[in-house]
Each structure stands twice: as structure tokens, then as C-alpha cells.
Amino acid sequence: MSGPFNLADYYLFDRLDEGLAEAPALLFGERRQSYAEVAADVRALSAYLIAAGVAAEQRVLLALPDTPAYAAAFFATLRIGAVVAMGNPHAPTGDLDYLVRYTGARAVVTTVDVAGALAPTLAECGCLVIQVEDVATGEDWRARRADASPAVWLADALEGGRRLEERGAPTRRETEADHPAIWLFTSGSTGRSKAAMHCHRDFAFNTERYAISTVGYRHGDITVSVPRLFFGYATGTNLMFPFRVGATAALFSERPTPETLARAIERYRPTIVTNVPTMMGKLLEDDDARTARKEPRLDLSSVRFHLSAGEALPPALLARFLERFGGEVYDGIGSAEMFHIYCSNRPGDVMPGSLGRVVDGYELRILAADAEGPGAPTLPAGETGVMWVKGDSVALGYYGDRDKSWETFHGHWCRTGDLFRIDERGYLWFEGRADDLLKVGGIWVAPLEVENCLAEHPVVAAVAVIGVELEGLVKPKAFVVPKSQEEATESLADALKHWVQTRLSKHKYPRLVAFVDELPKNDRGKIDRKELRRRELAGQNPVGR
């Protein structure tokens, strides 16, 4: 792809040309916006941003909850040729301060509380600040109040932009397919998050290959997401992909819990749910609790399929979920470096426990951990190595980190850092991260393999495994969330060790088992093993048995 191209056209304005102007684009509680109404907001905000001096390729940082304001700011930034960067509005102030400085943001669109907390930094950096209220689902996302920071209200920016548009002010800039469009942040598992820099063309490629051709987004779908829109996984599945096919993105602004997700499903009756394994397990527990209270059970009958990514989906959990709720679950893997999912299960082709097969248009290779380039010999089927992926959605590199870019990006190829084995039929089996490997007794152990084994035990709700030093040697330590804290006994710890010993090679069993109420998660919703390791070194973790 080359030549003139803009993602705001591809995802939004092309729907108007297709006759879908009045089709529902966004649902927010009882509030509904058509594609024409979203487009009108985007044109107005685009005019305002241009007039305010936001230039092409400058960064606009969005730190917003999941409300229609997100769509307006996201597509307006793209329409004027600026670059979208996204952050979690509920992250610690220090993390958001880092994002403002790291991105060199020319403008920040965020909540009034974040604008107030970051006021000194925003003033120092000379950012244009546009603020919104952090409203509950269904409330007026254009609301404003008098006792806030002096930043511009989004409602005022929209009104000002409409007046500019009426006077003939520009509402767009021409862009090329290879112009910068969006910075997607890594999860920061090895330090501060880095931005993978993507062009307009990258997102269209994956949308056509994965969303439409592989899992089958279509007009008439209604989508709901557990991960929030600032996370590229959900930006794709619950904004970009539905907009591409003229479907409807249904939003809820509250923190995702079994209760808030259940309310969203009951209200919107979605056909596609972007899910994660942890929430799938919690939905089962919530449904059990409803049954115990003799309340109506969860009704997921509207859902054609759930998408799963971000963490391992144990086959036992998948089986229980499907037996209880029906539908299908398409587990896959993607990355910020490639924008979205490039290996996935799909309609008519689901292999429980695997992450499916390569998405058409991508190429995968499993290479030795010390391979220096994609031309190294591929490993035999069944042997674990590092996955390399090739596809037209590959990022340009990491902003401000040439050394890490050279390690990761090799022309058309990306070294993912994920450990996989591929079987004779082409199914991919995730074995963890290369930097998570433990050397136990001189043999490499993938913590994920131990976690998957423990997750099959009937009393284990969640688990994470890290390496700890025991008598000068590295040994696996398991942190287990039991389904009932009353079961967290020394006898259960011994039973879990024996469970692994009888199912895996004996050197892989956890020498220590610690029971916890919950596992730390990063802002992408993934188990934060880095935080577990930090706590272990600081003596803040339970000792284990």
C-alpha cells in the first residue's frame, strides 16, 4: 500500500460514503451516536486542533475512560495527520507524567482530575489540554463544571470547532499510508513502557487480515470489551474493527468487574466480547454465586464469539466456559510491535490450549533463542524457541531506543521474545517469555508450563510462577489464589507440588507454594511477574510452604 491514505477515512468517513450515516456507531448506556454524528464531532474537533496549532506528526496523548469522547479524540487526531498516543487515565500520576514527557505531547485529552494532577507538567511542557468529566455509563460525556482546572472543555472545543468549520476552516490534512499514525506502548515488562511507532497502513493491513478475514467481524455486530480502549488490543477490537464494517461499539466507563461486564452484556446484547481469561473465570464464579442466591443466571446467548488474549487460556477453563455459556472463544496472540493479533484460533478451527495458526498474510518462524536474525535455521516441529513474525503491520521501531529497536526489528521481521513450539499441523503453543525462563538444575523451565499445570487443579483460581533463590540455587515458586481461602493449608501446598511432580518433569515442580488473595496486574491486565519478583527481593511476598 502506498499513496494518500488516512485511518479516519478508512474506519469512519468511508462508512458515510457507503450509506451507513444513520447506522449506530456508538452506544453509551441509553445514549446512541450514529456514524454521521461521530463524524460531525470528529470534523469539529479536527478544526479546533488545527486552529490551536497542533501540527502534523505531533503527538496527542489520550488518557480517557471508555466514553464517546475517546472516538472523537482518536479519529480527530488521525484526521489532522497528528499521532495518537494512549495512556491509562487511572494510572499513577508519575506514570502519566512520564508519558507526557516521553511522547513530547503537543496536546493532551484527558479527565479533569488527571488534568489537575498533571497541571505543573502540562504547563511546563506547553501542552494544549482538553478535559472531560469522568462520567458513569450513560451520563453526559460533554458535561462541564465551573470548579475545574483552566483547561479547555471538550464540549467548548467541539462548539468552537463547529464555528470554525462554518467559516471554512480546514478540518483535515492529507496523509500518506506510510506517515506516522499511532504509537502503541509495550506493557513495560522489562522497564518503562516504550512506544512502537506505527504508520496508517499498518492498522488497515491487520484489520483486513485478522478482524475481517480470520474471525469475521461484520455489519450488524455489537461489540463490548473488558480491556479498556487505551490498550491497543481493545482499541482494535472495540473501536477500529467494528467501525471498519459499520458495526456498533458499545462502551461502559466503569472498571471491568463481573458485575459491570454483566450489566453491559445485559444492556447491549453484544455479539462479540473482547475478553481475557481472568475475567472468564470470574464470570463463572459470578454465575455460581447467582445460582447460590437463586437469582437468574448470566445470559450470554447473544454472543457469537469471545476474543481472548493477553494471558494463557487453560483448556480446562475454556471447556467450563463453553459448557456454561455457549458461543465460541478465539484465543490468539499479538503485540504492540505488530499492532494486533497475528496468530489465532478462528471459526471452525479451534484447538484448545493452543493459540491457533498463523493469520493469513503473516509468516512465523520458531528460531533458537540466540538466533541473530530471521534467516537462522527454523527449529523442528515440537521444539521450543523464540517466535519471529513477518507482516505488513510491523512497527518502524521504538521511539528513543535504537538499541532495543535493532534487537527487535529486522526489516520486515519482528523478534517477539515469546517462546513457542509449533506442531506438525501448524498449531502454535505458547511456552512463556524468553526473559521469564528459569534454569533449574541446569535445565530450562518455562514458568507458564508450570502455571498451566497448576491451573488444572480443581481448587486453583489463579496462579503465577517466578524463580527464587533457595540455598544459592534458582527454584520455582508458585503464588496461588485458591478458590476459597479456607483451603489455603500446608496440606494443599504439598498436594499442589505433588500434582506437578506427577504431570511434568520432576525438576519443574514448585519448591515453594505461597497462597495470596490476588495476583498483581499491570495496566494491560496481565499478571505482573516483574512486580512479584520485586516484592520477593524486598521480602514483601508470603514466604511459602
Image (cartoon, rainbow, N blue to C red):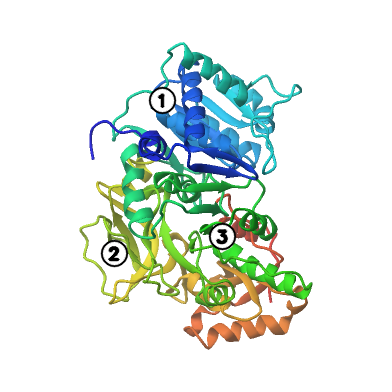
Q: Residues within 10 Å of mark 3 (few under 14, many from 20)?
A: some
Q: Which of marks 2 and 3 is nearer the N terminus?
A: 2
- The percent coordinates of residue 239 (x first, y second) are 48, 45
> How far separated are the C-alphas under marks 2 and 3?
25 Å
Disc sitting over residue 80 in the figure: 1
Find numbered disc 1 in the image and state the secondary structure of the residue it sits on: loop
Q: Name the residue under label 2.
A: 367
Q: Residue at x 70, y 42 (%)?
A: 136
Comparing 486 with 465, the one in front is 486
Q: Residue at x 45, y 18 (%)?
A: 50
Please determine whether, in this image, residue 351 is positioned above or below residue 206. Answer: below
Please determine whether, in this image, residue 271 is positioned above or below residue 543. Answer: above
Q: Residues within 10 Å of mark 1 (few under 14, many from 20)?
A: many
Find numbered disc 3 in the image and state the secondary structure of the residue it sits on: helix
Q: Name the residue under label 3.
A: 529
Q: Quadrant of residue 360?
A: bottom left
Q: Quadrant of the C terminus?
A: bottom right
- The percent coordinates of residue 166 (x first, y second) are 48, 14
* Camera-nearest label, 3 or 1: 1
Q: Which of marks 1 and 2 is nearer the N terminus?
A: 1
> How far separated are the C-alphas under marks 1 and 2?
41 Å
Comparing 157 with 159, the one in front is 159
Residue flagged by tag 3: what amino acid is it?
Answer: Arg
| Contact between labelled residues 2 and 1, with CB atoms less than 8 Å apart | no
Q: In this view, does 113 lie to the left or right of 368?
A: right
- The percent coordinates of residue 457 (x first, y second) are 60, 81
Q: Earlier in the sequence, mark 3 or mark 1?
A: 1
Q: Quadrant of residue 1?
A: top left
